[in-house]
């Protein structure tokens, strides 16, 4: 079955006796045991819930994994993955990552987990950092917010050679454009809050694996931590997924137009978008995914202009988050990356001139006019 059809017709095991066309919301904390054989499909909703299970099976199919587990947020999903490890384990991570992941890793450092942050696009550099206690490589591609690209297949070969797990946060491209498990990754993470849900109306996270033993461990830690996705939120995310392909197509087309427009403006010093042929990661991204997504970051000529844009935009909204139907602009310095030590932040170029755009599904000509007026108006 094609991806688009799967998103609408997951045809998974819910037997609704009324023939409901959408998955019912099983808003029940607990489930009656019908006999004493102790072999219950559902018993308590922290462990499993029919609405959530349906969504989990769907997401596993979309990513071509064997299992997926749904969490209350993306951060809960990442935290659960790190329950697989222990102190004194070492990890190599992309130097550019979602700010919340960086904050989690800083707290894990206090518990003696070891981290090296490098340009994971540079395989030699990554290999040189591997130590006896290295357990996993953790990447985002394209990365947040600089849109750096890592070759998933090449880095997975390195992981196989040294027996490391490859963990990929696939929030930005979604399985519609990129399927890391098919390229050699072991674990895929999502902030379902973003494109999967797609409407900025709920939070969610996913961990998807292609290995039964890993899946078992994740399910065990998920029920232990208890940050599970509620039945209603599961319903909202599943509803969002039905239109994922349509949204991603529109967002991708619009983002490319907007990136090309911004690139021509003298007051914009840099445009980071993997769909631009001038982007250093363009070819690798093209090899491993079928699209570029909707995330663009820019460096404008002055702090004054950055603030002018944020103040004057009308259709775009100045707000944190990404991946929804509404276009948003973020000021990473004050928002997603505010907790980074200042030298680290500046070294990445995340300064007072740096903005991150999440393109929504509005008409691209309206979005371009909005930016034009905000800049020149
Ligand atoms: C938002 C985000 C997260 C965290 O997800 P939450 O649902 O906000 O907890 C993780 N990774 C990436 C790439 C994100 O954009």
Image (spheres, rainbow, N blue to C red):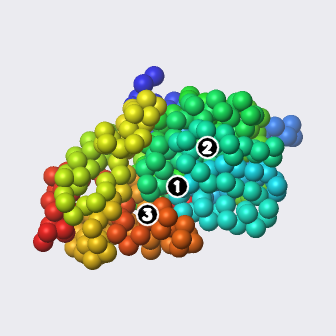
Tell me if mark 2 has few (under 14), some (14-19) or many (20+) residues whose alpha carbon lies within 10 angstroms of its own: few
Label 2 SS: helix
Task: Using the image as rendered, state which of residue 48 and residue 165 is in the foreground.
Answer: 165
First of labels 1, 2 by sequence position: 1
Q: Nearer the viewer, mark 3 or mark 2?
A: 2
Q: Which residue is mark 2?
A: 125
Q: Give the spatial CA distance, label 3 vs label 2.
A: 21 Å
Task: Using the image as rendered, state which of residue 53 and residue 89 is in the foreground.
Answer: 89
Measured as percent of width and height from the top left, residue 123 is found at 59, 38
Q: Give the spatial CA distance, label 1 vs label 2.
A: 15 Å
First of labels 3, 2 by sequence position: 2
Measured as percent of width and height from the top left, residue 177 is found at 42, 36
Q: Which image quarter: residue 299?
A: bottom left
Q: Which residue is mark 3?
A: 349
Is 153 left or right of 238, judged from the image as shown? right
Label 3 SS: loop
Quadrant where the N terminus is found in the figure: top left
Work out whether residue 275 can be spotted: yes
Q: Which residue is mark 1?
A: 96
């Amino acid at each position: 079955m094609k991806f688009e059809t799967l998103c609408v017709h997951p045809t998974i095991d819910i037997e609704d006796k009324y023939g409901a066309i959408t998955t019912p919301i099983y808003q029940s904390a607990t489930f009656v045991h019908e006999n004493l054989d102790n072999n219950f499909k559902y018993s308590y909703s922290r462990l499993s819930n029919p609405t959530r299970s349906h969504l989990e099976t769907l997401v596993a199919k979309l990513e071509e994994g064997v299992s997926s587990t749904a969490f209350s947020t993306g951060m809960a999903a990442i935290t659960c993955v790190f329950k697989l490890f222990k102190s004194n384990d070492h990890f190599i991570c992309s130097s550019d990552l979602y700010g919340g992941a960086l904050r989690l890793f800083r707290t894990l450092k206090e518990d003696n987990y070891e981290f090296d942050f490098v340009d994971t696009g540079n395989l030699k550099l990554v290999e040189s950092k591997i130590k006896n206690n290295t357990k996993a490589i953790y990447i985002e591609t394209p990365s947040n917010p600089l849109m750096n690209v890592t070759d998933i297949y090449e880095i997975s070969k390195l992981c196989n050679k040294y027996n490391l797990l490859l963990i990929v946060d696939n929030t930005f491209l979604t399985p519609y454009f990129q399927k890391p498990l098919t390229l050699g990754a072991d674990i895929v993470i999502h902030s379902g809050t973003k494109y999967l849900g797609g409407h900025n109306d709920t939070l969610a996270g996913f961990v998807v694996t292609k290995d039964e033993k890993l899946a078992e461990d994740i399910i065990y830690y998920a029920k232990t931590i208890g940050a599970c996705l509620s039945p209603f939120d599961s319903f909202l995310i599943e509803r969002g997924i039905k239109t994922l392909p349509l949204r991603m197509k529109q967002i991708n087309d619009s983002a490319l137009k907007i990136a090309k427009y911004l690139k021509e403006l003298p007051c914009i010093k840099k445009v980071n978008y993997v769909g631009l042929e001038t982007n250093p990661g363009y070819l690798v991204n093209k090899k491993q995914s079928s699209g570029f997504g909707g995330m663009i970051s820019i460096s404008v000529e002055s702090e004054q202009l950055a603030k002018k844009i944020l103040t004057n935009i009308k259709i775009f909204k100045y707000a944190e988050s990404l991946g929804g139907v509404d276009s948003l602009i973020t000021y990473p310095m004050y928002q997603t990356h505010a907790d980074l030590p200042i030298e680290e932040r500046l070294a990445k170029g995340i300064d007072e001139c740096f903005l991150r755009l999440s393109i929504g599904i509005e008409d691209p000509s309206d979005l371009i006019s909005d930016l034009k007026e905000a800049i020149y108006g």
